[in-house]
Amino acid sequence: MFMLNDFSKQCSKSKLSPLCEQLITASKQAFTVNNGNIPKWEDAISSIKTQAMGALNYAPPYLNIAADIDKVKLEHSLKQLMPWRKGPYQIADLQLDSEWRGDMKWNRAIPHIQSLKGKIVLDVGSGNGYFTYLMALAGAKIALGIEPFLLFNYQFQAIRALINSPPNAFVLPLKLDQIPHEAVFDTVFSMGVLYHQKDHNLHLQQLFSVMTKGGELVLETLIIDQQYGDQIIPEDRYARMRNVWCLPSTNTLHTWLEQAGFSDIKLVDVTKTTPEEQRATHWIGDNTQSLKDFLDPEDNNLTIEGLPAPKRAIFVCQK
């Protein structure tokens, strides 16, 4: 993987250097998995590498690459890597409108966090690296995304192959428990991850363990209003998602963070998810359902299962 070589060079010149070999070895192993889609994804990457490269910049809502492309050919290649959940991206006049408008979440978080300039940053559950790129563009010395779902790693490589002089943003096919418990990250982002964890306490403890003293955690997750109690544990699905294990109130989540050892805990945003932020586009493939299909058609304050509709909170705290 061409990106691993670049990561190795940057990693060895930073305080991540003691972890480099372990991270790269684990990543190489992850890419050797037997997945029948890999030949299609690799063919798409090979085709994308024949396109011209351009400079990367943030032109909200898009991460924009100014390159002289063959639009038809590039669109065909990128669609071999569907579904595109995170984004959106724009390459020349090709708009890759992902399911999520990531700029909306970023704009809610960024006014409340410490500067990322010169920081070593970890983006847990990074998807295809949309936020990881934004972290690097915000001045991070290294922005490392970890994402175990291989397709999203290939999406990251597809975008990176189009960037001339890419920033120090990297995505590795790893889980959080594969990151050595070394206090090396100055800022850690966990956005849209906590509710997928069977053991929320373990997730928070792992985040704490990899952060430098005085480092900052940016945690974004689904929550419920206090009127529904301290927490809801869905019996089956939540908004048609199978793997949602717990929806806490903001008070409950504050307590969890305290118990994990975090301090100076601030709730900086609570926002109901809307179809403006999460929507069906032709970039998500054959399954065209999105948020509006997951809500009660008679009451958009409820999910299709009769639970409170998705609402997300952002907490910022320190180690």
Image (tube, rainbow, N blue to C red):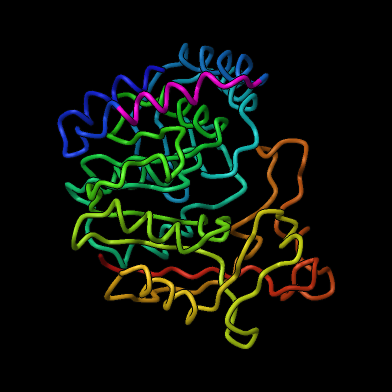
Residue 78 lies in the magenta stretch: no
**Can you say which quadrant of the picture contains the C terminus?**
bottom left
Q: Give the percent coordinates (x, y) of residue 50.
A: 47, 11
Q: Give the percent coordinates (x, y) of residue 286.
A: 77, 36
| Residue under the image location 51 percent in, 64 percent down | 221
- Secondary structure mostly seen in magenta is helix
Q: In the picture provided, is 71 more to the left or to the right than 257? A: right
Which residues are the magenta region? 22-35
Q: Give the percent coordinates (x, y) of residue 257.
A: 39, 71
Q: Give the percent coordinates (x, y) of residue 227.
A: 62, 88
Q: Is residue 67 visible?
A: no
Examine the rendered structure and indicate whether residue 88 appears above or below residue 257: above
**Can you say which quadrant of the picture contains the N terminus?**
top left
Which sits in the foreground, 256 or 37?
A: 256
Q: Is residue 201 visible?
A: yes
Examine the rendered structure and indicate whether residue 171 appears above or below residue 140: above
Q: Quadrant of residue 109?
A: bottom left
| Residue under the image location 46 percent in, 41 percent down | 175
